[in-house]
Image: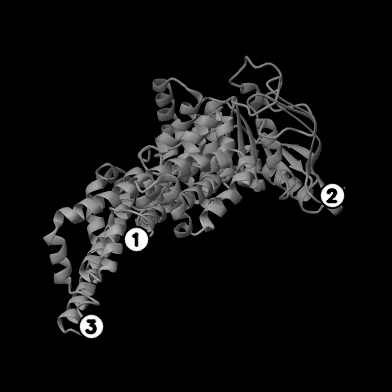
Amino acid sequence: MAAQSTIEQPERTTAPAGATASATRRPGGAGTGLLRFARNTWRPAAVLVAILLVWWVVTAAELVKPYLVPSPGTTLDVVLAQPGYFTHHTWITTYETVLGFAIAILVGVLSAVVMVYSPTVEKSLYPLLLFAQVIPKIAIAPLFIVWLGFGLSPKVVVAVLMAFFPIVISTVTGLKSIDPEMLQLSATMGAGPAQTFRKIRFPAALPHLFAGLKVAATMAVTGAVVGEFVGANEGLGYVILQANGNLDTPTLFAGLIIMSLLGVILFVVVELLEYLVMPWHASRRTDAATTTM
Amino acid sequence: MTVGNTTTQRSADATATGAAVDIDEVAVRFRTKKKDVTALRDVSVRIEPGEFVAIVGASGCGKSTLLKLVSGLLRPSSGQVRLHGEDVRGPRRDIGYVFQRAALLEWRTARRNILLQAEMRGMPKAQARQRADELIAMTGLTGFEDAYPNELSGGMQQRVALCRALLHRPPVLLMDEPFGALDALTREQMNVELRRIWRETGTTVLLVTHSIAEAVYLANRVIVMTPRPGTVAEVIDVDLPVERDYGQTMSAPEFARATGRIRDLLGATTTAE
């Protein structure tokens, strides 16, 4: 025992400073995480305020005609004048976006798994996937209206189509970038493919998957709105189209801002989820002094 | 290839009959697009239970391939590999494997990385935890059980990998340049510890290494391999006492003789014959 401790002594000093301290800090990491989140968000918030300020100055000084660019006040008034109207249409678009996003995750991850485990499926499916991706969604959206009618389903389908691709690509990349030695090790442990997938391969792919999800979240919003542009009687896309037709720029601006907020919120939700699912990854990222927000 | 070393008689598993590892006239050929590459040819090695055997050779001579054959991760093109008298047909569960990189799961703490072995094998939980605690104490990881891999130094990570490989008490431990990525000082400490752990566990160890000193200090026998296509050039019996103090061993005449001979075999192949 004495000999052992003399051996390990220098090793301890070479271990990263505070290794044990950070290990014990970990369970209570959520609070500090939120604090860190706040610390990271004030900068973009300040930029946002600055943009609002410029917008206000430009319109207040009447540098542009009010019917081209409404003031922030007018835009806010439009929303406050008909809160029910905006809430309803925002809800519709949110519903289409989130549903489309959820379906895209399910289908995307599943097809990525199948493709990684079966080269035959990958070879036959990949070109099709690429084809589905490069085709302009705005061009095929009318077809979905013809097929599925004016309801919510064509919008959801377009949202799925937009969000699907980044999820598949990132999941395939994640699942393939597994250390081959890890798989060999798993084989010597007597683990079956399902066990290896659940305990090693899938968790290892999560950082890639979440990168794809973040891109997909913003795409899903675009998809839903594109679907609404082509043919709808509700939703933010419909609101914008209507406002545009009536040269009602305050409503147009309000719709645009709400739509952007929707995308941002969805993105932030995914990012929070990422932090909750992979605290190990998030902590490593901040250790490296890189932040995403 | 008889073994005249007394240390091999202290084998823990007396139940095992015959050799722990028996490699018989094995050859491995890889077929690439352009040509066939022979990685190994005419390799015959017999390792008794409880032995510590090191394999040294130039890069690409098929040392790692040899370990993959024993573990069943790779099948020989010809010849036979037997583990405790059984033909190796697929990946073997009755071995422990340590790679050059620790290959730890970064979302698991040190302890849970070690316990991965138990989860995959469906070992009883209480028994696995107790064994993990034993190994953590044995390898000096106490105090670091709940640290994540990115919070551990390279040496500590490799200890975790070693614990994971030993959790299920494998009769044979395969180590593929386990200390190759460590700094010289940490490497020496790990050598001393591995020697002690080997003596405490009584496992048969097959160690691939680039370090001649490491091979001679740790092993009872050193297999020296020729460059590709790899085959056994010579097997060196290391006539050092069982109790090996690191400093004393380094300056022992027998150590100088063994390392000198290996260096001759590896370096000056033109003058060696």
Tell me which amino acid carries mark 3: Val
Image point (56%, 53%), residue name: A130
Residue hosting label 1: A291
* Circles 1 and 3 on the same chain: yes
| Up/down of A203 relative to B96, above or below | below
Measure the C-alpha gap from mark 2 to mark 3.
91 Å
Q: Is residue B208 visible?
A: yes
Query: The residue marked by circle 1 belongs to what chain?
Result: A
Q: Residue B160 carries which label?
A: none
Q: Residue A64 carries which label?
A: 3
Tell me which amino acid carries mark 2: Ala
| Up/down of B173 relative to A240, above or below | above
Q: Position of residue A173 (x, y in %)?
A: 53, 49
Where's the N terminus of chain B, which quadrant? Answer: top right
Q: Between residues A10 and B179, which one lies in front from this camera angle?
A: B179
Tell me which amino acid carries mark 1: Thr
Q: Position of residue A160 (x, y in %)?
A: 42, 48
- Asked whether the beta carbons under mark 2 and mark 1 sit within 8 Å of each other, the answer is no
Q: Earlier in the sequence, mark 1 or mark 3?
A: 3
SS class, disc 3 = loop
Q: Where is residue B250 in the image (x, y as percent from the top left)?
A: 61, 46
SS class, disc 1 = loop
* Circles 2 and 3 on the same chain: no
Measure the C-alpha gap from mark 1 to mark 3.
38 Å
- Asked whether the beta carbons under mark 2 and mark 3 sit within 8 Å of each other, the answer is no
| Up/down of B15 relative to B217, above or below | above
Determine the residue located farthest toward the top in the rendered image.
B15
Query: The residue marked by circle 2 belongs to what chain?
Result: B
Q: Can residue A40 be seen in this view?
A: no
Q: Residue B272 carries which label?
A: 2
Q: Between residues A114 and A205, which one lies in front from this camera angle?
A: A114
Front label number (2 vs 3): 3
